[in-house]
Amino acid sequence: MQDVSHQDLSRLHNAIEYFREATDPELSARYMAAIIYVSLNPGVSILKMGEAVGASRSAASRIARLLSVVKNERLGEPMDLLIMREDPKDARMKNVELSPKGARIMRQFVSILNSEGKRRNPARRKGGH
């Protein structure tokens, strides 16, 4: 991997670790990809988000629910990273965007990627987990 520097990989690693610590250490890459996709496409439909991350319609709905208001049994609280809203053009469809918490985590994630490799303290969930 001659084109990728050790420093670039280190920043990516630090950003991913921050993201996992700020959300859920067991969050899969698909869920992370969904949050990043929504960050890049605010107000996107759950269906489009699912297509972007290779998830079926039902899996995309499950991802959106888990990342928004559904209580995470392991964490004991909702993740509150996404907001789901009814599509104004089609009441059967839902659109998603980052919640204020999700936006804050994504800003820090990008800040770490753009930093000089210094690790920032993670935003902790309630309970200090």
Image (cartoon, rainbow, N blue to C red):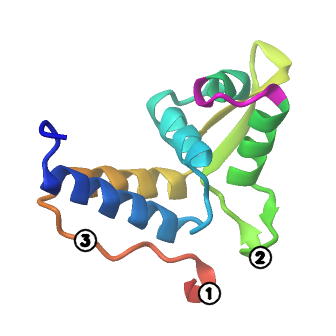
Mark 2 surroundings within 10 Å by alpha-carbon count, few (fewer than 14), some (14 through 19), many (20 or more): few
Residue 119 shows which numbered tag?
Answer: 3
Closer to the camera in the image, 67 or 30: 30
Please report the bounds of the magenta region as a residue range: 52-57
Q: Nearer the viewer, mark 1 or mark 3?
A: 3
* Residue behind mark 1: 127
Whichever of callouts 3 and 2 sits on the residue coming sooner in the sequence is 2
**Element carrying mark 1:** helix
As measured in the structure, the alpha-carbon distance from the residue carrying label 2 to the one carrying label 1 is 10 Å
**Element carrying mark 2:** loop
Position of 98 compared to 58: left or right?
Answer: left
**Residue found 66% across the figure and 44% down from its top:** 83
Mark 1 surroundings within 10 Å by alpha-carbon count, few (fewer than 14), some (14 through 19), many (20 or more): few
Q: Are marks 2 and 1 in contact (CB under 8 Å)?
A: yes
Question: Is residue 54 on the magenta stretch?
Answer: yes
Image quarter of residue 90? top right
User: Label 2 amino acid?
Assistant: Gly
**Residue found 79% across the figure and 37% down from its top:** 59
**Residue found 65% across the figure and 21% down from its top:** 48
* Residue behind mark 2: 76
Whichever of callouts 2 and 1 sits on the residue coming sooner in the sequence is 2
Which of the image's four quarters has the N terminus? top left
**Residue found 71% across the figure and 31% down from its top:** 55
As measured in the structure, the alpha-carbon distance from the residue carrying label 1 to the one carrying label 3 is 22 Å
